[in-house]
Image (cartoon, rainbow, N blue to C red):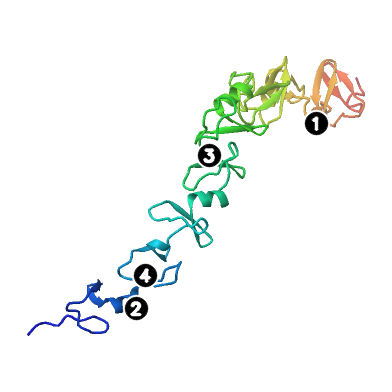
Amino acid sequence: MTERFDCHHCEDSLFGRKYVLREEQPYCVRCFEALFASTCEECGKLIGCDCKDLSYKDRHWHEACFHCSRCRSSLVDKPFASKEDQVLCTDCYSQEYSSRCQDCRKAIMPGTRKMEYKGSSWHETCFTCHRCQQPIGTKSFIPKDGQNFCVPCYEKQHALQCVQCKKPITSGGVTYREQPWHRECFVCTACKKPLSGQRFTSRDEFAYCLGCFCDLYAKKCTGCANPISGLGGTKYISFEERQWHNDCFNCKKCSLSLVGRGFVTERDDILCPDCGKDI
């Protein structure tokens, strides 16, 4: 007895007939097309077993129906792009939708490498340094007056040179006595600590932090022996080549503050009038 060979769906015999296997099950052509065949996006007809099914993003076409939505040229075995459910050849897509190069004004074709900066686009070979005309590519660059420069060219043409290290200042920096410095180069002459963002003073055109300036140059208070900086509104009393902090200018005997009061002297001591009345 011969084993039966039937369509998995309608169970009609497949002996001597064309059939299609799907998941290891045989189907007659009529059942396969009714159950599984895709509908062509262009003509709306089924894509039968004897036709090539071209698919893109869950959409299907007959080979003869797969053409550019705008110029109608065939897209079979050609690059294409899609926009708003349309499939377009690269020429039509670039004319309609592609950005244009800021330099040569030609369309930047789909799939072409491009450079983007501040909302503008360039072909990779058109995005060049204004000075040396070499493509910048993925290297760092610096914009200046609407033009782009590679870092070496910018440093040669525009960057200020640090007074201390003589190297270009490409970002930040400070100005002191109308001269440019790197932040890390602008340091205290004595202790070498950075002065950028800190209070400092100068002597003989050299910059010092307040601590070093006081240690090196400030006069000492006769009362506490600490430096009197005179900076930042510091108040002090000066008498006969001696200086006191306001808080230290007190009567030697009773410690009464003598700021704004009369006083008398006994040898090197400063006394209030009461303590010095017997002198």
- Which one is in front, 185 or 195? 185
Mark 2 vs 3, N-terminal side: 2
How far separated are the C-alphas under marks 2 and 4?
10 Å
The amino acid type found where label 1 is placed reads: Asp
In the drawing, does residue 27 fall left or right of residue 93?
Answer: left
The quadrant of the rendering that contains the N terminus is bottom left
Label 3 belongs to which residue? 123
In the drawing, does residue 268 fall left or right of residue 128?
Answer: right
Dot 3: what SS? strand
Label 4 belongs to which residue? 47
- Which one is in front, 171 or 187? 171
Label 2 belongs to which residue? 34
Of badges 1 and 3, nearer the viewer stands 3
Q: Residue at x 91, y 22 (%)?
A: 278
In the drawing, does residue 41 fall left or right of residue 228?
Answer: left
Count neighbours of disc 1 (C-alpha within 10 A) and say few if under 14, some if 14 to 19, many if 20 or more. Answer: some
Count neighbours of disc 3 (C-alpha within 10 A) and say few if under 14, some if 14 to 19, many if 20 or more. Answer: many
Mark 1 vs 4, N-terminal side: 4
